[in-house]
Amino acid sequence: MRGAAPPRATFREVFAVREFRAVWFSQVLSVTGDRLALVALTLLVFDRTGSPLLSGLVYASGYLPWVVGGLFLSELADRYPRRTVMVVCDAVRAVLVAIMVVPHVPVWALVALLFVATMFAPPFDSARAAITADILSGERYVLGTAITQTTFLAGQAIGAVAGGVAVAFLGVRPALAIDAATFVLSALLVGLGTRARPAAARPEQAQSEQAQSKRAQSKLAQPSPLARMQAGLRLVFTDRALRTLLLFGWLVVFYTIPEGIAAPYAAGLGGGSIAAGLVIASTVVGTTIATPLFSRFVGPRRRIDLMGPLAVLTCATLVLTALRPGLAASLVIFSLSSVFGTYQLAANTAFVIRVPNERRAQAFGIASMGVIVGQGAAFVAAGAAAEVLTPAAVIAIGGALGTVVALVLTLRWRRVSPPGGRHAAGRRPEPAPASRSVPLRESG
């Protein structure tokens, strides 16, 4: 029946798909391995040099490569088979991390190896996001996205803890060896657990001599990586709906500020490292728990309608830190803000669905790059501001700025995609020409 709401998907239905199980578990291994290596190498550099600055730069090297990888490598998952891209990225990272295990490697070489290895995370993640849309459809895709988002957050937390534990009980090099093994296992899972698919951006079969001639000419004049990157940016930023969804996703730079200044915030409340750890955990635990529930029990159209209000509340909740609450109240505030952050599911789903399949991985890479780089810049800015203001004031100001931006985006989104519009999140729009993005909504 036309207009009827699509049937709700269940976790059992999603995990019953063999390919999704393989991609999901490979993500668990890759994300956990990424974080484990970053923590282990940071501890190694600090142990060798005793310099907080150098160890901080090493930690930043786990974020900066997303600029290069997100802009120039993510589109590889559109030009080549996505399964192949994921396997190659894992294999390269396994080799690079294995080299770190070799004794007496200079510190600068370790940092360089980590930098290069991290550059292969964006194309892997872009290929994973794009291939998930190939594997799952409709509400199964929405629920699958919720699962992978939750997995990403949980994997980061587990990887950080595992890195600290592994370094404490095994040492840095065995920890890095474990990391290399996670990438090998991830590559095997994807290679053996998913079926081969052609590249999404492959040219159409020739129907005439003229078409064959045009393709031959285009092969002689392939656009440069810079031109392809510019084309991806034009795709994302010239479409009003895509641009709005992308900015909804980038609001994360405001409401994750507590994570970046957790240590001075906890110290200001008389707490130590445990209190700082609780602050960091509270910034993600709400989203981790609420996202699967949001996808399971809130309908597609309702999710889109709630996206703007939830985005506003996510940032506005942080303004309460201006009242200088104690540790317990602060944890409640950060957790509540994190719960409202489930709006990212609606934005993400709409963004991925709206982008043409042959450009999906590149667009997702640009979106992810903005989040990672934006968070890094926000953490630095918040730390600098905390030198002259209290951490609580910095968080409140960040929340206020994010609230204003969220309100503007909410108003803009209502003009782009009115409530009750014909495209529902989680439903695939009608096919669009390959050179254009799909009309009316999206997710980021």
Image (tube, rainbow, N blue to C red):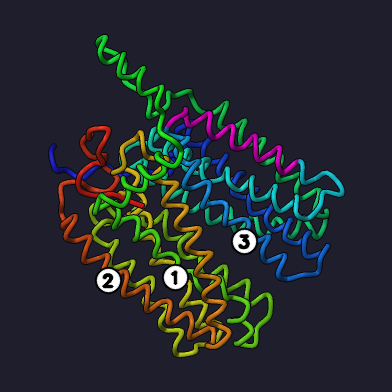
Name the mark nearer the viewer: 3 or 2.
Answer: 3
Image position, residue 135 (x, y; %): 41, 33
Which numbered disc, 1 or 3, marks the residue that appears first in the sequence? 3
CB atoms at circles 1 and 3 under 8 Å apart?
A: no
Separation of marks 3 and 2 at Cα, in angstroms: 31 Å
Residue at point 56%, 45% (across, down): 121
Name the mark nearer the viewer: 1 or 3.
Answer: 3
Residue placed most toward the observer, 341 or 430:
430
Q: Amino acid at mark 1?
A: Tyr
Which numbered disc, 3 or 2, marks the residue that appears first in the sequence? 3
Which numbered disc, 2 or 1, marks the residue that appears first in the sequence? 1
Numbered circle sitting on residue 407: 2
Residue at point 39%, 60% (across, down): 342
The residue beneath circle 1 is 255
Query: Does the magenta stretch mainly form a helix, a strand or a loop?
Result: helix
Badge 1 marks a residue whose secondary structure is: helix
Badge 3 marks a residue whose secondary structure is: helix
Separation of marks 2 and 1 at Cα, in angstroms: 14 Å
Separation of marks 1 and 3 at Cα, in angstroms: 19 Å
View extreme (bottom): residue: 323
Residue at point 45%, 46% (across, down): 365
